[in-house]
Image (cartoon, rainbow, N blue to C red):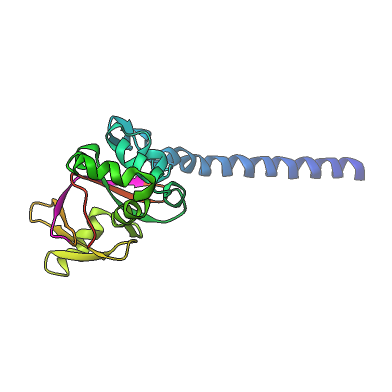
Amino acid sequence: MKTRMLTLTVASVALLGLAACNNGAETEAPAAEATPAQTAPVSTDPMVGGASMSPNETIVANAAKASNLTTLVSAVQAAGLAETLSGPGPFTVFAPDNAAFEKVPAATREALMAPAGKADLTEILTYHVVPGRLTAADLATQAQANGGKVELTTVEGDTLTVNVNPDGSVTLTDQKGGTSRVTQADVLQSNGVVHVIDTVVMPD
């Protein structure tokens, strides 16, 4: 009799356990279904130079895929900055496209890309980099608190003035008084954010 009662008790406990598992599965199911909605679809990755920019890749890895940033990538490699810009950062990079580099006289470009011009090239490139991740919204917030513009201290050490215009467009003014326009903002990277610009900015 004792053996039979023990068997019935074990069976009852097993059934209760199974019921609890089933109830838990029913209550957890909606959460499991909601998970995909919380993940940004791949289609949201912006296109730069005909290539999809993944927010899971570094600034250098993404730039290497963009057909309109080939000159910038070559310059970064010539200056020995590829490893730095592949690091954790975060960095905000104002990235001149190929057309921006074409505005620089050919003789100057050639001199900068030569081994003897490495120091000057590094100075110019790091003037396009600001520590931290500053989106267009971040820049707009800072500019709004400062009369429409904000001065950023670049990795090179000089300041770069960012103006957020009434129409929402962003322009940069460099130390020499030259201006550049942001043509594509908020290209997110795993180690920062890139804003594509139409003119190379120059430090003092």
Q: Is residue 199 magenta?
A: no
Describe residue 115's horizontal placement relative to residue 197 as left or right: right
Q: Position of residue 146 (x, y in %)?
A: 15, 70
Could you say which is closer to the camera, residue 67 or residue 33?
67
Count of marks placed on residues:
0
Could you say which is closer to the camera, residue 38 or residue 128?
128
Describe residue 31's horizontal placement relative to residue 65 as left or right: right
What is the magenta segment's predominant secondary structure? Answer: strand
Quarter of the rendering containing residue 41: top left
Q: Residue furthest left?
A: 166
Describe residue 9's horizontal placement relative to residue 47 as left or right: right
Look at the image and give the residue range highlighted in magenta. Answer: 176-188
| Image quarter of the C terminus | bottom left
Decide if residue 172 is in sight here.
yes
Residue beneath the point at 39% across and 48% down? 79
Decide if residue 46 is in sight here.
no
Q: Position of residue 154 (x, y in %)?
A: 30, 62
Could you say which is closer to the camera, residue 13 or residue 185?
185
Q: Is residue 180 magenta?
A: yes
Q: Residue furthest top?
A: 50
Q: Position of residue 187 (x, y in %)?
A: 30, 44
Quarter of the rendering containing residue 39: top left
Q: Is residue 122 above or below residue 28?
A: below
Quarter of the rendering containing residue 42: top left
